[in-house]
Amino acid sequence: MDTFIQQLINGLSLGSLYALIAVGYTVVYGILQLINFAHGEVFMIGAFGALSTSLVLFRGTTALWTLPVMIIGAVIASVTTAVLMERFAYRPLRHAPRLAPLITAIGISVFLQELVRLNYNQVPFTSWNPFDLPDAKSIIPFPSIDVVTGPAIQMGGVTIQREAIFTIGALIVCSALLWWFINHTKMGHGMQAVSQDQDTARLMGINVDRIIVVAFALGAVLAAVAGVAQGLQNHNINFRMGFLAGLKAFVAAVLGGIGNVAGAVVGGLVLGVIEAMATQYIPGQFGGSPWKDVWAFVLLILVLVFRPQGLLGEKAVDRA
Amino acid sequence: MHQRSVVQVGASLLIVSLALSACGSRSDTKTATNGNKTAVIGVMAPLSGDLSALGLGIQHSVELAVKQANANNTIPGWTLKVEAKDDEGKPDVGKNAATAFAGESNVAGVVGNLNSSVAQSTQPVLATAKIVQVSPANTNPSLTQGANFATTPVRTYATYFRTCTTDAVQGPFAARYLFQKAGFKKVATIHDKKAYGQGLVAAFSKEFTALGGTITAAETINPDESNYQSVISKVKPTAPQAVYYGGEYPQSGPLSQQMKAAGLNVPLMGGDGIYDPKFIVLAGTTANGDLATSVGAPTDSLPAGKKFLADYAAAGYKEPAAAYGAYSYDAANAIINALKVSLKGATDVASTRQATIDALGKVSFDGITGKVAFDKYGDSVSRVLTVYKVTDLKWAPVLTEAFK
């Protein structure tokens, strides 16, 4: 029983990261029918933003009060990236055939990875490093903030990592704020309207361009929080961390029902738990950590075969 | 109208790209400024990415060897140049680098690669071009002795040599240390599914169980991921006394840190892939007690090694020589010694390639890591290994021994 709870907590903590990133994918898809493959890089840039804030402003102290400032730094970095991405890469392609923004997204993903790898510690085309930032070509240790990192908490036979508590707590808080935003603010209602029918929403006087920017920014805020959480969990960040996390989060969004925000959260948690359980409980030759990704994706395929709209389905009204 | 603009754009793009490619310079400088002929020694290593600390150390050590050879006029009538290509630690990028070397006619030899998985792709390419390849760091035995190296060793590529010893020696060396010297009878193994890690763990496990120990768990991790909690939770209940890891420091550092934080407070032991100062940085304050084996004696334990480190520092390279600097220096000198024989009286490099292969098989000299000579498979004859332990958050040598 202890092992079960242990792996459940591992799975929920991993799944919370996927869920936070998956919301960004699903919100953009719901409004634009665009799969923003560069969202993983927004997550990565959020983590780098938090690291930069810590190094530049606090010279790497680990006091707890620096954590909110780091999160703000992460949010600023990722929202800026997402908004610029939308303005200069996706808006001009708003009326292009569907393939063009998709390929652009892949291109932006590569561009952002290389931008961080080559220019994190030096202004482009120079070797000027005003803040003495570390080289991003190899992995960089992430500051271990007091209270949220440190020795794990023992409860009976179960070891609960503090970072896991932080991640799951962050997911709960962010989900609550997200639910309140979408259901109880004018902007949130506008987002629901635009995802149901863009043209009618425009006729109703909703500024669709602004809603789209807000959608990107919203996804970016959650991805920034996920970036800080991952940095705290793994104690290091690197420029490639967005690639695999983004891929898994996209899978989680599809699993839960693409376009459905609650589905993204549920899909992320389910994927994380399945990975952890598959590592522990599948016996024999096809079990253990080598096969956990296989089982997670087998589950995805089964869900899509029998329920193509995902676990929670598309929430938008059918286009008649 | 639309079609005409496509043709216009397409045609102008084509013309511009052709013009630009013509403007590109060809890098075939056949004669150096003093009338000497030029021979190139290539370097293939990860110059960017996670393992760049090791790769840049390899590059600079080869540059130092070539600089000294040119200064001493070791090969009269010839000037040596170093050309370094980044293989990023990835097989397909390495293959491109090897193909580029194979296409240049004045490449006399290549020092590389770092990763066994990359060498598996580059060996055939360089072998077809008959360019000698000396690796300072590949430890997978199948690279010199074929896929069935345990039962029927057969040399697949006559052009491939290495100055370091193999995992067929390194794995059992670690097994004997853990079982006999440290007294651990129950060990769990983890590897990253790549050629190096998997081979090392297999060699370790075979010897460890033959000595009488038990492998309590055999797990793997995905090297692209950075969260190893589920694997650690699976290994912890089996109560191992140590964890043996096959792979490199970008994964093993965080693994060690996450292991200790989750309550699995046992030493992590690895091979030469984790022996790097960056491992301790990534593993954090709980790294004390972790172990690693590395090929050869510590560089500064031999007088020739001390001189190499002094020369390296004097040359002013930004990055340190790292774990494989000494082996790369010996690899470069092995090629230079072979070229002393094969380039004598030759007019160009390409025709001497077979002679270089033959000469390299016969070299024998005292390098800074010990005696440099190759056996019939291309493996190094010296099988000295060292166990290092993290003490006070620094690697300190514990035991240096020749494996029998």
Image (cartoon, coloured by chain):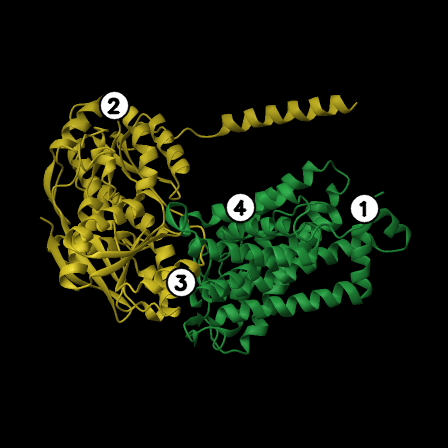
Badge 2 amino acid = Asp
Disc 1 versus disc 4: distance between alpha carbons?
28 Å
Badge 4 amino acid = Phe
**Chain ID of residue with mark 1:** A
* Residue identified by numbered label 3: B233
| Residue at the (47%, 57%) spot, across then down | A276
Q: Is residue A200 left or right of residue B338?
A: right
Image vertical order of residue B6 relative to residue A25, above or below: above
Q: What shade has chain A been given? A: green
Label located before the other in sequence (1 or 4)? 4
Q: Which residue sits furthest front?
A: A1
Disc 4 versus disc 3: distance between alpha carbons?
22 Å
Disc 4 versus disc 2: distance between alpha carbons?
56 Å
* Residue A71 x, y percent position in the rendering: 59, 69
Asked if labels 1 and 3 share a chain, the reply is no
| Residue at the (40%, 33%) spot, across then down | B96
Q: Quadrant of the N terminus of chain B?
A: top right
Asked if disc 2 and disc 3 are in contact, CB closer than 8 Å, the reply is no
**Chain ID of residue with mark 3:** B
* Residue identified by numbered label 2: B348
Q: Callout 2: helix, strand or loop? A: loop
Image vertical order of residue A280 relative to residue B196, above or below: below
Asked if disc 1 and disc 2 are in contact, CB closer than 8 Å, the reply is no
Q: Quadrant of residue A22?
A: bottom right
Q: Quick one: A317 or A183, which is closer to the camera? A: A317
* Residue identified by numbered label 4: A297
* Residue B398 x, y percent position in the rendering: 16, 63
